[in-house]
Image: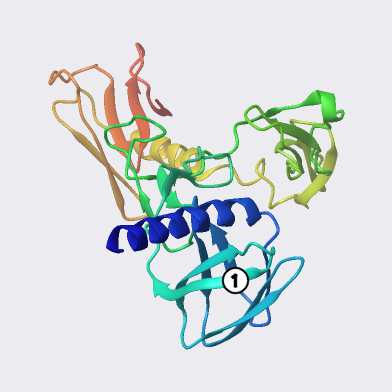
């Protein structure tokens, strides 16, 4: 009697497994809660619910309302009887083992890449798997976006170079992902150079485009007011006329309360050229063959 009962039980279990596999394609879930998933394995059904409530399972002939007390994974045993009717033969809360698969992906120009394993049944079962995809022994599992590799792309349009007064148009493409874009480099602005003075106005010309324009009124222009270094040289020349020859040591000249000390680089004085550097500007005190002394920019 015991043996007959055991055989009957084993047959019922086998029949359940076969029945579940045979009917798997027909069973559907009517989700009245939102977020309910129904998963089948080789011999079982699992319902994953987000909270307490009722979910309906149905096939072509019969429906079952399953009431859940809380959010969890639930095993649902289903079987078709000899008449083809759907029967509920098991229902309990269970934990489904994670089934991990490789979901690694390489980084792109704009998106992160990952070396990662994830459970195919749930969103919560995942972990980084450093080196799984890239093979890098220093991999952390996360790869930064690569960034675009921009090159000029005349095939997308004709580039227009910026001028002194107008911005340009440059076309670009990424060699990695073929994304394309356009930039508008700013206008260059004029590069003005003093070109002359007519006694009334000063004039300037652009070194880039040959444009011409008026400058400050005559009297305030570079010709009438030379740079500070040239003014200093002029004053140093006036002071140099009072130097007594022969020169036997360093010579100090004072312009606007600033000392300019001229020395011999070789340490020998007499009729040698003397040198002075002040605020990054180099000056030379030169003694001519006729004994005339002058100061010039080095």
Does residue 173 appear left or right of residue 116 in this picture?
A: right
Name the spot of residue 15 as percent of width and height, x first: 51, 55
Name the spot of residue 106 as percent of width and height, x first: 50, 37
Residue 247 lies in quadrant: top left
Could you tell me which residue is drawn at 83 percent across and 24 percent down? 155
Between 220 and 3, the residue placed more toward the observer is 3
Q: Work out whether residue 109 can be spotted.
A: yes
Could you tell me which residue is drawn at 77 percent across and 35 percent down? 170
In the image, is residue 283 above or below residue 76? above
Q: Work out whether residue 241 can be spotted.
A: no
In the image, is residue 123 above or below residue 207? below
Could you tell me which residue is drawn at 76 percent across and 26 percent down? 153
In the image, is residue 278 above or below residue 265? below
Name the spot of residue 154 as percent of width and height, x first: 81, 24
User: Which residue is identified by label 1?
Assistant: 87
Label 1's element? strand
Does residue 220 appear left or right of residue 170 in this picture?
A: left
Between 152 and 1, the residue placed more toward the observer is 1
In the image, is residue 93 above or below residue 40? below
Between 114 and 20, the residue placed more toward the observer is 20
């Amino acid at each position: 009697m015991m043996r007959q009962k055991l055989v009957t039980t084993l047959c019922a279990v086998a029949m359940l497994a076969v029945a579940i596999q045979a009917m798997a394609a027909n069973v559907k879930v009517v989700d009245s809660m939102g977020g309910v998933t129904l998963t089948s394995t080789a011999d079982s059904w699992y319902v994953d619910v987000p909270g307490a409530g009722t979910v309906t399972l149905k096939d072509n002939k019969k429906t079952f309302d399953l009431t859940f007390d809380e959010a969890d994974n639930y095993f649902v045993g289903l079987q078709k009887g000899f008449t083809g009717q759907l029967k509920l033969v098991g229902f309990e809360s269970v934990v489904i083992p994670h089934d991990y698969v490789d979901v690694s992906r390489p980084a792109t120009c704009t998106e992160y890449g990952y070396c990662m394993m994830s459970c195919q049944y749930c969103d919560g079962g995942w972990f980084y798997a450093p080196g799984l995809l890239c093979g890098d022994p220093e991999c952390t599992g996360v790869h930064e976006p690569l960034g675009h590799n921009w090159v000029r792309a005349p095939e997308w349009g004709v580039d227009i170079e910026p001028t002194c007064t107008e911005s340009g148009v440059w076309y670009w493409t990424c060699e990695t992902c073929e994304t394309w874009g356009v930039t508008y480099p700013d206008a260059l602005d004029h590069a003005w150079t003093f070109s002359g003075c007519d006694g009334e106005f000063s004039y300037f010309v652009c070194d880039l485009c040959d444009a011409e324009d008026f400058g400050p009124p005559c009297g305030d222009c570079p010709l009438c007011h030379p740079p500070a270094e040239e003014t200093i040289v002029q004053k140093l020349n006036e002071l140099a006329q009072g130097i007594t020859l022969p020169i036997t040591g360093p010579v100090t000249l004072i312009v606007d309360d600033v000392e300019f000390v001229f020395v011999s680089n070789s340490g020998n004085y007499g009729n040698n050229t003397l040198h002075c550097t002040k605020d990054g500007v180099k000056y030379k005190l030169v003694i001519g063959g006729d004994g005339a002394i002058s100061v010039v920019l080095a």
